[in-house]
């Protein structure tokens, strides 16, 4: 069984979710030779280094070294676990998922996850019903104050935790245990009392891309010493660093209307306000800075983003951090500054949705935004302050790779400072040289054991079915690393059954990401060898030679430790025979 499913079933699943067609739903691919290429979705790059091998059915990035098959691609792109990826691919292929065989811990984890999702779904609906009770006047007054209509309340399934114990009693009545509730992040215990962690708060359910409720964000309705906003703690289904409020609704917009860009705002209130004003393409982080996981979620839906955080100093500082994370993730970024230190909700209520649309239409490229943000920290009427700003601005321009792009932003700096373009160019050239020198580091040379290198070459040659690679030499008895043993046995079994082995199979049988030696085999560069067949034979002999040399050492130690002359004579004969095999390059005993 391969991770709980039969090899045959997994191969059928992958065949029906052919890797090129599957990845093409996420990336723009270009065929060059036998392979397809794209800009890597897992790191920022302008020149495509993400390669999809159609024959072997796996991908590899020559930049960041990410690789895998269609299942691992879905796991990484959708930020989901193995079973979730299997479920999505099976649904796409209209395949029924068979019963699977896994160890008890994996089965228990899946059962817990299903229970947690069921609890969260029921809890969300119960909170939503609570909002409309006659006794929920405090929550009702708040939503009226925020001018939420029934449309927004229904769209976001906004609810109310009316007290500290109602949800505990409700979930008990649905036959869930306190531990189930704790696993879902809903209940905690203090002084032997079990209570709803979101008690007396307005509830905003958090959904994933697949419209599953995975947690809650809640706002206090009364003055408190605790945080105004509170999110569900990390659970088996929720991690605030990997989820975005409103991402499920953005996905629906893409499916129904298409997306030109996604707006990133600061909080869920802004998301609700923007939806109310007709801007449905918006998401918000959940009390944390934007992370690479968030970026990946966004990029899966759209490559273009407008950052629209609060207009105050803290909001603009957060905008710079958000920009840097998005750019590193390969997203096209523009940004706006909302006037008068307002947030999007306040601005729309004060100026109207047309004024906000005008801000979006005039959003500037992230580099210009960073330059203008930096300018606000200096008084350009003072010579020394202007000089400092120019220096800082040139450092920002140095983030660009091409001279043509740099010229565009040198013009921006020139217009802001009136410093001649040729002077800016001269200073930029000097600062660029300093950056290059700073980044130049002596390359560290790592030596690798010759036998390990030989083993990797042999296994890589067998994996890629090289003409010179064969099974005449029984490598297994010379292997110690359990991963190498398992891999060799697998390859040999395919060979004996006369079945075709593909690299993509490795990602179903091994935890490749945590096996650096296996990564080296998958990513093996055969170009460094001039005569591959000759080198293959040399590698086989290197392994055999090391084995014989080590055997001689062991026998010599036994000889020296033995006081029995008869035994010493037998050991001496064995040493002589082994030395003869070594001299004559005998491959098998």
Image (cartoon, grey):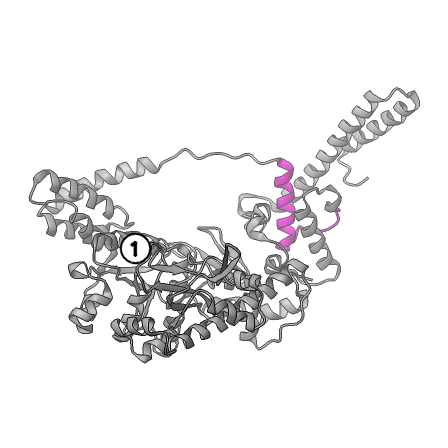
The C terminus lies in which quarter of the figure?
top right
Residue 333 sits in quarter = bottom left
From this view, report whether residue 382 is shown above or below residue 133. Answer: above
Q: Is 151 a magenta residue? A: no
Q: Is residue 466 visible?
A: no
Residue at 39% across / 68% down in the picture?
203
Taking depth in this image into account, of 226 and 471 the one nearest to the observer is 226
Magenta highlight on residue 467: yes
- Classify the position of the N terminus by image quarter: bottom right
Residue 34, horizontal then vertical, whole percent? 51, 62
Q: Residue 301 appears at what percent x and percent y?
A: 39, 68
Residue beneath disc 1: 323
Looking at the rendering, the stretch of residues picked out in magenta corresponds to: 450-474
Tag count: 1
Q: In the visual, does 433 lie left or right of 12? A: left
Q: Residue at x 19, y 54 (%)?
A: 408
Q: Nearer the viewer, residue 564 or 257?
A: 257
Q: Residues within 10 Å of mark 1 (few under 14, many from 20)?
A: many
Residue 201 relative to residue 335: left or right: right
Task: Look at the image and tell me whether residue 411 can be seen.
Answer: yes
Q: Position of residue 164 (x, y in %)?
A: 44, 64
Q: Secondary structure at mark 1?
A: helix
Q: As drawn, which residue projects farthest toward the left?
A: 381
Residue 212 point in image, percent of width and height: 47, 71
């Amino acid at each position: 069984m391969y991770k709980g499913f039969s090899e045959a079933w997994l191969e059928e699943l992958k065949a029906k979710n052919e890797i090129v067609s599957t990845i093409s739903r996420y990336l723009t691919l270009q065929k060059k030779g036998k392979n397809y290429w794209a800009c890597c979705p897992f790191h920022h790059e302008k020149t495509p280094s993400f390669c999809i091998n159609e024959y072997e059915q796996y991908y590899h990035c020559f930049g960041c070294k990410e690789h895998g098959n269609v299942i691992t691609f879905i796991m990484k792109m959708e930020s989901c676990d193995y079973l979730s990826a299997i479920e999505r691919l099976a649904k796409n292929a209209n395949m029924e998922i068979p019963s699977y065989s896994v160890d008890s811990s994996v089965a228990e984890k899946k059962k817990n996850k299903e229970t947690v999702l069921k609890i969260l779904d029921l809890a969300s609906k119960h909170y939503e019903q609570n909002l409309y009770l006659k006794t929920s006047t405090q929550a009702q007054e708040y939503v009226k104050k925020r001018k939420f209509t029934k449309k927004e309340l229904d769209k976001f399934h906004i609810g109310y935790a009316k007290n500290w114990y109602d949800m505990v009693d409700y979930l008990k009545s649905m036959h869930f245990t306190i531990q189930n509730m704790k696993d879902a992040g809903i209940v905690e215990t203090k002084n032997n009392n079990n209570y709803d962690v979101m008690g007396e708060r307005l509830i905003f359910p958090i959904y994933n891309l697949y419209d599953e409720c995975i947690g809650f964000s809640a706002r206090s309705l009364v003055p408190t010493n605790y945080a105004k906003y509170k999110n569900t703690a990390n659970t088996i289904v929720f991690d605030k660093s990997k989820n975005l409020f409103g991402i499920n609704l953005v996905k629906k917009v893409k499916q129904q209307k298409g997306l030109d860009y996604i707006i990133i705002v600061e909080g869920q209130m802004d998301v609700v306000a923007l939806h109310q004003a007709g801007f449905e393409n918006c998401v918000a982080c959940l009390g944390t800075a934007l992370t690479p996981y968030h970026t990946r979620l966004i990029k899966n839906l759209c490559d273009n983003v407008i950052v629209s955080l609060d207009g105050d100093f803290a909001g603009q500082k957060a905008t710079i951090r958000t920009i840097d994370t998005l750019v590193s993730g390969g997203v096209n970024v523009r940004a706006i500054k909302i006037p008068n230190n307002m947030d999007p909700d306040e601005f729309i209520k004060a100026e109207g949705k047309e004024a906000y649309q005008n801000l979006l239409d005039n959003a500037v490229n992230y580099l210009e935004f960073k330059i203008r943000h930096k300018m606000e920290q200096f008084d350009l009427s003072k010579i020394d302050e202007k000089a400092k700003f120019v220096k800082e601005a040139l450092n920002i321009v140095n983030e660009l790779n091409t001279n043509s792009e740099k010229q565009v932003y040198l013009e921006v700096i020139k217009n802001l400072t009136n410093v001649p373009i040729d002077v800016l160019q001269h200073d930029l050239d000097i600062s660029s040289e300093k950056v290059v020198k700073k980044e130049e580091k002596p390359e560290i040379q790592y030596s690798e054991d010759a036998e390990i290198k030989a083993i990797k070459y042999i296994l890589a040659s067998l994996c890629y079915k090289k003409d010179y690679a064969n099974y005449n030499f029984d490598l297994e008895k010379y292997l110690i690393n359990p991963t190498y043993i398992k891999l060799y046995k697998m390859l040999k079994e395919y060979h004996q059954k006369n079945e075709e082995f593909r690299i993509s199979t490795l990602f179903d049988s091994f935890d490749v990401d945590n096996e650096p030696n296996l990564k080296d085999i998958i990513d093996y560069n055969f170009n460094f060898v001039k005569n591959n067949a000759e080198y293959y034979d040399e590698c086989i002999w290197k392994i055999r030679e090391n084995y014989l040399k080590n055997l001689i050492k062991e026998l010599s130690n036994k000889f020296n430790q033995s006081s029995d002359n008869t035994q010493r004579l037998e050991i001496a004969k064995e040493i002589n025979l082994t030395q003869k095999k070594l001299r004559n390059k005998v491959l098998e005993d």
